[in-house]
Amino acid sequence: MGYQLTPEVVRGTRDLFGAAVHQRQALIQTLTATFDQAGYDPIELPLLEHRELYLKKSGDDLIAKLYHWNQGGRDLALRPEWTASVLRAVISGLGDAPIPLRLRYAGPVFRYERPRRATYRQFTQVGIELLGAPGPLADAEALGLAVTGLRELGIHHWTLTIGHIGVIKTLLNSLGLPERITSALTWSLERIRSKGLDAVKQQWRDNDDDDLPVDLASLAHLADQDLETLLLRVLPSLGVRLDSGGREPQAIIQRLVRKLRRGDDALNLDRAWHLLSALTAAHGPAPSVMQQMRELCTEYTVATDALDELQTTLDLLKAYGVPTNQIVLDFGMGRGLHYYTGLIFEIDGADGLQLCGGGRYDDLVAALGGRAMPAVGFAYGLERIVAAVAPAEIIPNKSVLVVGDDHSLVIQAAASLRQQGYRTAIDLRQRSYAANLNDARRREMSHLALVNADGIQLRDLNEQKAQ
């Protein structure tokens, strides 16, 4: 029995036609022109990358959504986001470029996640990366540009939500917990916000219930690095798989070592849950939340340098015309990607749909093998932007069907109309005037051009429709 082809589109993807494609192209053109005016140069990159590129700092949530496979002995993946790919390209091809380096991009990415409103498994990101610039000036440029892009598209009702991974880690570091536990707690914030603290604490306890064919306690005298190296070598020989679920073997080993050490950190871990609860409650208008966070810094005896930088960024946003009443601070936001180190942000539309997100990731360039440099960036989700913009605002409205008996005159007339800015199509089937009129209206064209030896007679179909 032969294979029967199905015409159905793959779940989570879409076919787009005509006006929908024009709309997307117009949006991309507006956004990239906005980036270009701010000095950002275009970059185009392959869809296909080495899988390990996304295992360094992306986090379990994104890794679990990778489209990946092994071919020819190489582990490959479809690009799930642009930032890591841009940095890989910068490291390999732009190492001598002057900094700060401003880059912009637009193109598809792929994530295996549940399709829902304006959320697909293939979608398009349009964004920027600003490399080599530290501090509030660069953060404010990124935030200001993200808001400017929405403004250029006619989107004025939105909420900018800002968090700060650096402040969160500074507070958690004051508890004296190992770095791996501090990082794991930091990236638990999103789950706490969505599932509640008790559920995340239970999940944390459940993760300690691994049944391993080795007594970790007997190895407690080893330093963490030596223990990790030993387990990476020994566990596979004992039949323990370290390549399941898309997670990097090193991350699995680090969690096992964290389990061994956690017994000594029980008291400080309880304090950490209390701190995380306070952080998720720090949500609202900037002035009041900043006061809450300064009080937390005093309680945990930590410096306020990162908070001071965030305040400077907020002050600079006024110069970019960002309304204060559309800004919310949220220190329970984590954004899921583990490469963020400082300011993070999301912009939601009037209906709560997230339109844009990004943040600072100062350690990622070095983690991917390049020279250390500060970096910040963001991306719009084009499908979300489309849902927030009225199609009538961007669909082309100067289009014409050119008809006539003399083929040469029709071709010449079409060329002349194109030079005048019309989107022009020629009648190729030699139909009657009535048939062409009906065809032009079905295609939502604005004009019909009748061509003869006397010239071009241009008829406005919108005026006829109004009559």
Image (cartoon, grey):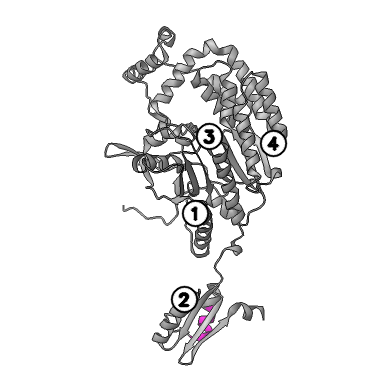
Disc 1 marks which amino acid?
Answer: Asp
Q: How many C-alpha atoms fall within 10 Å of the one at disc 2: few (<14), some, or many (≥20)?
A: few
Q: Which mark is residue 286?
A: 4
Is residue 437 a member of the stretch shown in magenta? yes
Q: Are marks 4 and 1 in contact (CB under 8 Å)?
A: no
What residue occupies the far front of the structure in this picture? 98
Is residue 408 a member of the stretch shown in magenta? no
Sequence-wise, which precedes: disc 1 or disc 3? 1
Residue labelled with disc 1: 36
Sequence-wise, which precedes: disc 3 or disc 2? 3
Give the residues in magenta: 432-438
> Which secondary structure, mark 1?
helix
Residue 226 seen from this side? yes
* In front: label 4 or label 1: 1
Task: Measuring from the top left, give residue 122's x and y in whole percent.
Answer: 46, 48
Task: Measuring from the top left, give residue 5's x and y in whole percent.
Answer: 37, 55
Q: Are marks 3 and 2 in contact (CB under 8 Å)?
A: no
37, above or below 18, in the image: above
> Which secondary structure, mark 2?
helix
Q: How many C-alpha atoms fall within 10 Å of the one at disc 4: few (<14), some, or many (≥20)?
A: many
Residue 77 seen from this side? no
Q: Residue at x 49, y 54 (%)?
A: 36
Residue labelled with disc 3: 336
Sequence-wise, which precedes: disc 2 or disc 1? 1
Residue labelled with disc 2: 419
Would residue 360 be found to the left or right of residue 162 on screen?
A: left
Near-viewer residue (50 or 298): 298
Sequence-wise, which precedes: disc 2 or disc 4? 4
Q: Are marks 2 and 4 in contact (CB under 8 Å)?
A: no
337, above or below 28, in the image: above
Q: CA distance from mark 3 to mark 4?
A: 23 Å
Disc 3 marks which amino acid?
Answer: Gly
